[in-house]
Image: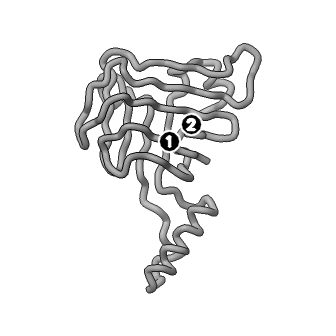
Amino acid sequence: MQVDERLTLAIYVPQKIERSQDYLVDNSVRLFAFPQSKEPGTSSRLSLPTKMNYRLYCDENLFQLFEGQRANTWIFIGRRASDDTAYRNTEDRGDRRRQRQATLDAGQNFDCRVSVALNKFSQGLQRHIGRVNRNGVLAAVSSTSCPVRYIGLILQ
């Protein structure tokens, strides 16, 4: 997932995840950070495995990676309701779909939003990039249904 022009993140989940269940992944999931700009003292890439007791949950509206309990979430990707005031009263389905896509392209609406705790990678990365909190997802590539195997996102 490309968080902004300065950071790309990747998640590798080597096993299939059952839908709508907390799944114990322990240390098998790998997370990668690729900062595009470098601050003195930062690496060109960071790679971390998850730790023991890490769990993953996904369904059609949510992807969540957390340690032990959901309050310790590291990565959160979720669908949000869109502001449909621009196309709510449009009768034709095709026109409504085109108007909705125009709000997505303009950055007014997003199908999904993501939050990532960058301090889990390193304090330097978090200080350099800043917060990734409810950033809008512009495009996504994944399996059409959970079990999730690979997720790729481009974020604004």
Residue 4 location (% of width, % of height): 65, 41
Q: Is residue 6 left or right of residue 80?
A: right
Q: Is residue 57 left or right of residue 35?
A: left
Q: Is residue 80 above or below residue 135?
A: below
What residue lies at 33% left-to-right and 15% top-to-bottom? Answer: 52
Residue ID for mark 2:
132
Count the numbered circles shown.
2
Tell me the mark number nearer the camera, choosing from 1 and 2. 1
Q: Which amino acid type corresponds to the residue marked 1 in the rendered image?
A: Gly
Answer with the quarter of the image where residue 2 lies: top right
Q: Do the residues under discs 1 and 2 have CB atoms within 8 angstroms?
A: no
What residue lies at 46% left-to-right and 82% top-to-bottom? Answer: 89
What residue lies at 24% left-to-right and 42% top-to-bottom? Answer: 20
Residue 65 location (% of width, % of height): 38, 31
Residue ID for mark 1:
152
Name the residue nearer the viewer: 126 or 50: 50
Mark 1 or 2, nearer chain start: 2
What residue lies at 58% left-to-right and 46% top-to-bottom? Answer: 155
Q: Which amino acid type corresponds to the residue marked 2 in the rendered image?
A: Val
Q: Mark 2: which secondary structure?
A: strand
Q: Is residue 87 above or below residue 40?
A: below
Q: Residues within 10 Å of mark 1 (few under 14, many from 20)?
A: some
How far apart are the alpha carbons under marks 1 and 2?
16 Å
Residue 18 location (% of width, % of height): 24, 38
Q: Mark 1: which secondary structure?
A: strand
